[in-house]
Image (tube, rainbow, N blue to C red):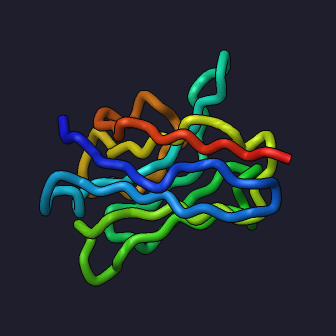
Amino acid sequence: QAQLTQSGGQSVQAGGSLTLSCAGPGRTFGSYNVAWFRQAPGKERTFVAAISWNREDTNYADFAQGRFTVSGDKRDNAAPIYLRMNNLKIQDTAVYYCAQSKLFLQTRLSPFVQDYDSWGQGTQVTVSS
């Protein structure tokens, strides 16, 4: 299993923006779909967004649609993946995780935790009023 490296979490006020990053361990990172999940205290880990291995297709949870953007470099699939979060709300407070899909070159962008087996260390995002 690959170890992904995250950065970018911090505390912001409601309405603000943050960008999280997720880097893979090497060139093989570019052959896997990457997803973002989040976990609030006492709650299950939930899907936020995903991007395909070729960095061309994306999928979002309903709450993320229109506010969050997942992106990568189409010219270099192994480059870091970013999650840009705009108009943050208090309920967006959580630990955010990036994850790499179990299978490579997948066309389906799964929203399910069990389809990912390599995870970042998590990064805290705190949104205050």
| Quadrant placement of the N terminus | top left
**Outermost residue to the top:** 42
**Residue 58 x, y percent position in the rendering:** 53, 64
Determine the residue located farthest toward the right in the rendered image. 129
- Occupied quadrant, residue 51: bottom left
Residue 101 higher or lower than 115, as above or below? below
18 vs 113: above or below: below
Q: Nearer the viewer, residue 108 or 125?
A: 125
Q: Is 7 placed left or right of 80 in the picture? A: right
Numbered-mark total: 0
Eyeballing the image, is 5 above or below 75?
Answer: above
| Residue at x 75%, y 51% (from the top left corner) | 62
* Whole-percent x, y for residue 102 in the image: 28, 39
Residue at point 40% right, 53% down? 7
Corner quadrant of residue 28: bottom left
Q: Position of residue 82 (x, y in %)?
A: 45, 64
Q: Nearer the viewer, residue 30 or 42?
A: 42
